[in-house]
Amino acid sequence: MELIEQYFPEITPDQREKFAALQELYKDWNSKINVVSRKDVDELYLRHVLHSLGIAKVQQFLPGAKILDVGTGGGFPGIPLAILFPETNFRLVDSIGKKIKVVNEVSEGLGLQNVVTTNSRVEEIDGNFDFIVSRAVAAMPTFVHWVKGKIAKESKHELKNGILYLKGGDLTEELQDYPKATIYNLSDYFKEDFYETKKVVHLPLKYKK
Ligand SMILES: C[S@@+](CC[C@H](N)C(=O)[O-])C[C@H]1O[C@@H](n2cnc3c(N)ncnc32)[C@H](O)[C@@H]1O
């Protein structure tokens, strides 16, 4: 929890309380429905919460903006981002019902008003989102294919509408067909070893009718 305060010192007491509540909520729900490995629950703030918030170091979401989290699993990166941006609307989608159940329980446990969840494949979701966020779901070509029709026409954000994807390792090959992609190294923001190779990829996508 100290990690979150260290890198996001501007959080309010309410946000602090919500971040602090995550560990118990995930411990509790994970013992009933396993969505996060045990080691990862012990290191929840380092491996999941702060990692999710890496997206916020690249782009601050505006009030009223619409964000889709594809393949959210147990709620990452969507839940930590929804705590950090309480006036931004988040839709968290996963094709596995039991994962969405955990996300619903955690979201309700925290009293988040800006999160809705959907249990379906993302291909079946309609909408126009300012950004599509994700972590560990699919390689970029597949991912782009899934989401390219779901982008809002205009956005007031600093970065262009599109994908913000948490990825690791050498992305040269995976991104060779995406010259407009920008890679942000999370090691520039977070000094823990865990972030040495972790990145946020921003890929602008055009609105398509
Ligand atoms: C490796 S997990 C990652 C979960 C979470 N994003 C995280 O980083 O902790 C991948 C998740 O994507 C979901 N998923 C895969 N393909 C999907 C699709 N087409 N639509 C919705 N969810 C999908 C899976 O059910 C799984 O929960």
Image: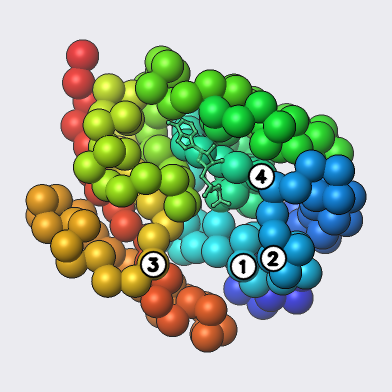
The residue carrying mark 4 is 74
In space, the residues marked 2 and 1 are separated at their CA atoms by 7 Å
Residue that appears at 40% across and 76% down: 197
Location of residue 59 (image quadrant): bottom left
Say which label, 3 or 4, has the lower sequence index.
Answer: 4
- Residue 119 appears in the picture as rendered: yes
Residue type at mark 4 is: Gly
Residue that appears at 10% across and 51% down: 177
Disc 4 crowd rating (10 Å Cα; few below 14, some 14-19, many 20+) is: many
Disc 2 crowd rating (10 Å Cα; few below 14, some 14-19, many 20+) is: few
Residue type at mark 2 is: Asp
The kind of secondary structure element at disc 1 is helix
Q: Ligand 1 closer than 8 Å to the CB at disc 4?
A: yes
In space, the residues marked 3 and 4 are separated at their CA atoms by 19 Å
The residue carrying mark 1 is 47
Residue that appears at 42% across and 16% down: 124
Residue that appears at 86% across and 39% down: 109
- Residue 114 appears in the picture as rendered: no
The kind of secondary structure element at disc 3 is strand
Residue type at mark 1 is: Arg
